[in-house]
Amino acid sequence: MTQSSSAKRSTAALVLAAGEGTRMKSATPKVLHQVAGRSLIGHVLATLTEVKADPIVVVVGPNRDDVAAAISPHRAVVQRERLGTGHAVLQARSALKDFNGDILVVYGDTPLVSADTYSRMRAARKKASGPAVVVLGFEPADPAAYGRLIVGADGLERIVEYKDATPQERAVRLCNSGIMLVDAAVLWRLLPKVKANNAKGEYYLTDLVALARKDGLTCAVVHGEAEELMGVNSRGELAAAEAVVQNRLRRAAMEQGATLRDPSTVYFSMDTRLGKDVEVGPFTVFGPGVTVADGAVIKGFCHFEGAHIETGAIVGPYSRLRPGAKIGADAHVGNFVEVKNATLEKGAKANHLAYVGDARVGAAANVGAGTITANYDGFSKNHTDIGAGASIGSNSVLVAPVKIGDGAMTGAGAVVRRDVPADALAVNAGRQETLAGFAAKYRAKKVAEKKAAKGRKT
Ligand code: UD1
Ligand code: MG
């Protein structure tokens, strides 16, 4: 059996990410910019992992420890000088010297390619005719400066870069996405033959096709979707990629059984997990690390990150859940309530204008409007523990560390600095004094003052 017809042939991936990304005008390397809470290169690596590409090697620019750290545990190789895509691939030669399957070359700034597309490329390589090189082509609305795929009777003949193309070649609409699947042996045998004798003076990976043909090998094109092959080179393209991914995530959420009242106003992260029959109202942002269990209701205008919402809970409108927020089954979190690193146990409620941070709110406890857990003393964060069934009066300040026992109460406006035992009431807002008739006298005096002032003016 020849290698190319073996069904078990393994695939390694090589991600080119040594580009400078100057059009982003950013201190952050281009491939670390995010779409749906995940870096561009993170998207690429996730899909390559999904299709079981192994190993995955990333070609990074010099002094790019940040990119190398972001791609860990995958291996980074450094391209010291930016001499072209062919040169970039060559830098990974020693990293892949023991690998003898197929090598999938992809770009770190093209985050939307689907696993299915990679699978179709692999399927093309496995055909009995066994093309040595499979190139992913597409027909963008505007072919602009993409390389053109020149296809003849025997398949793909060569790739010509826009700058080097004749007017007839520029009229070809089938473009090179840059993504390529190559037999490793062919790649390492032919790549050193690539010369930089072109308009850009670069070593073009694309020249591999003509070299393979000269060697008597065949090359094929697999057609991809223009939307998937969108590259990110500017902030505008970053926003366009975000829009594509958000639409995919909205569709997936609904397909998996969540109701989105107005999908176009809900924003997800790649790792958002919604259960069945979850309802999401309009204008809600799911930052990274959010899970919502079956049947929870999100009433809209909410902002979440690093939070878990249990089944039957009702959250929002206008709630903010920050990292470590755990909203228990049937618990309620209402408008202008912020929860951070805190657990609301089953049936607990914090319905209006509250800050619950570094705390536990026991089952069925009620946190009154305006309650604040004063968790920070200027130096460290302290814990507030509210027992099951406790009732925290409106505008209470719970000065942590502090413990409110099961079934205990605090009076409105209480500043609670000491623990409150179970079933006790803590009040310290001061005794009320009532002055009969004071308000009426006060008003009369003020009205008279105003009249006198007006008389002086006229
Ligand atoms: C490349 C293709 C072109 C294709 C287009 C699709 C070549 C010669 N041309 O052109 O046919 O239509 O992509 O977008 O391959 N990179 C490195 N090191 C380098 C040069 C590039 O890592 O020395 C990386 C870049 O970071 C980028 C990718 O390779 O991720 C493509 O490089 P770029 O310069 O953008 O190539 P294009 O001119 O767009
Ligand atoms: Mg490019």
Image (cartoon, rainbow, N blue to C red):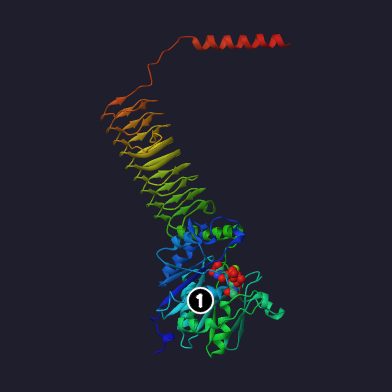
Residue at the extreme bottom of the image, as rendered: 216
Quadrant assignment for the C terminus: top right
418 sits left or right of 179 in the view:
left
Quadrant assignment for the N terminus: bottom left
Q: Position of residue 338 (x, y in %)?
A: 43, 40
> Is label 1's Cβ within 8 Å of ligand 1?
no
Identify the residue at horizontal 42%, vertical 36% (top origin): 355
Closer-to-camera residue (103/242): 103
Closer-to-camera residue (106/250): 106
- Image vertical order of residue 235 relative to residue 456, above or below: below
**Rendering quadrant holding ligand 2:** bottom right
Identify the residue at horizontal 44%, vertical 76% (top origin): 94
Closer-to-camera residue (92/448): 92
Residue 316 visible within the image: no
Give the quadrant of residue 206.
bottom right
> Secondary structure under badge 1?
helix
5 sits left or right of 35 in the view:
left
- Image vertical order of residue 262 relative to residue 337, above or below: below
Identify the residue at horizontal 63%, vertical 72% (top origin): 146
- Label 1: few (<14), some (14–19) or many (≥20) C-alpha neighbours in 10 Å: some
The number of numbered badges drawn on the structure is 1
- Image vertical order of residue 411 relative to residue 145, above or below: above
Q: Position of residue 288 (x, y in %)?
A: 44, 53
Q: Position of residue 65 (x, y in %)?
A: 47, 60
Residue at the extreme left of the image, as rendered: 422
Residue type, mark 1 in image: Leu
Q: Position of residue 83 (x, y in %)?
A: 58, 72
- Residue at the disc numbered 1: 90
